[in-house]
Amino acid sequence: MNDAEEDLPSAPPEPGEVGLVEPHDFVCPQPFRFESGQTLPGFTLRYETYGHLNAAHDNAVLICHALSGDHHCAGIHALTDPKPGWWNNFIGPGKAVDTNHFFVVCANVLGGCQGSSGPSSPNPHTGRPFGLAFPFVTIRDMVRAHKLLCDHLGVSSLYAVVGGSMGGMQVLQWGIEYPTFVRRMIPLATTARESAQAIAFNEVGRQAIMQDPEWHHGDYPKGGGPRVGLAIARMMAHITYLSDESMDLKFGRRKTAGVATPPGAATPSSRKPSAADAGSTTPASGTSAAYTFDVQFEVESYLRHQAESFINRFDANSYLYITRALDHFDLTAAHGSLEQAFAGVEAATLSVAFTSDWLFPSAQNREIVLALLRAGKRASYAELSTNLGHDSFLLESEELYSLVRGFLTR
């Protein structure tokens, strides 16, 4: 029994909060060679940690984020923060990933735009953002870069690697790439390779960005670029993260306030136009809002809000790079079969799927576990009944918390 297992409680304490946290930068000075054959003389990864590394340096839990996520998965950066990290409900004292007992690490991926090296980083040769001169990134590249971070932090082995969606892909790659370093894998709502439909959604998003006149083949200033295209890409992608039932329950066909008034009585919207409003029209005086292309339904307003918040924090070129990394992730093609891909895996695995996830359906998650079992590995599968769609792994779920807590403490 290792130190981490000796410290684990028999019953979870009352959940608490991580509290104030701050990001750190790992600057790797050594050259990094990408799968594409391209190289960087060095790179930076922005990361956060919660909890403490034990004496054996083997109680670390690595959190892998999804496409639009980042290193800030728990706690707050300031008392004035409007909301905590994206998985704050999951990570903290007494929570499913208990920071009283685990040293939790989360880093923004290579190719990202939240402090890690990516297309928006300055190119030392030009002083301008790399843009499309940045090397193409794969899921394996992301994992290899994060392994260097773990080495830098003094982690001797990972107690567990946990992630959903793109994060789940990284989890699987960790088990394959570093079998003796990883002891537990928890891939959630993920796949061993994207379907044609998932690739198609990514391509529509990329085309929305690249057809925006402000994209300029990836050469645009910080704060500028194809904001309209990125907004459209985000709106379309966000729909795939939800489900028909969840959208109907949350919004139905409810109209916005201006449209609910009788024809002829509506007044022009006072909301400030945003990049997501491109193509909208404001009704002429005395004209009903129902006869324009401005926001009429609550679901439209929600999507535009999601788009606006996204384009203010995410880089369009990073979106191109990361979605392409998702498309190229194919464990079957890389190893000949899933069974061969998992042949060297030593970690125990818990895979969790969600019934309403139509982006990476339950069958794709189940396929991962069946291949692990056929390869003679320790693996278990859980399918949770939800109506929240692909994003179910991010939302409040006592069932998920119980599964993960039990898997980590057994």
Image: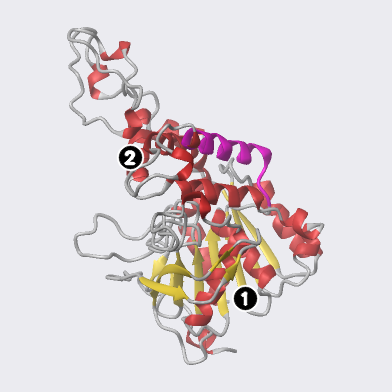
Which coloring applies here? secondary structure
Q: Relative to 104, is 277 on the left or the right?
A: left
Q: Residue at x 35, y 32 (%)?
A: 276
Instruction: Determine whether 86 is above or below 388 in the image.
Output: below
Magenta stretch bounds: 193-209
Numbered badge on residue 182: 1
The image shows residue 315 at horizontal and vertical percentages of: 41, 49
**Where does the N terminus fall, quadrant-wise?**
bottom right
Mark 2, other Cα within 10 Å: few <14 / some 14–19 / many ≥20: many
Task: Tell me, yes or no, whether the highlighted magenta stretch contains residue 62.
Answer: no
Amino acid identity at mark 2: Glu
Q: Quadrant of residue 246?
A: top left
Nearest to the observer: residue 405 or residue 339: 339
Q: Residue at x 48, y 62 (%)?
A: 401
User: Foreground mark, 2 or 1?
Assistant: 2
Q: Is residue 96 visible?
A: no
Q: Relative to 218, is 375 on the left or the right?
A: right
Numbered badge on residue 308: 2
Q: Residue at x 41, y 33 (%)?
A: 249
Q: Residue furthest front?
A: 125
Label 2 – label 1 distance at C-alpha: 38 Å
Amino acid identity at mark 1: Val
The image shows residue 332 at horizontal and vertical percentages of: 76, 55
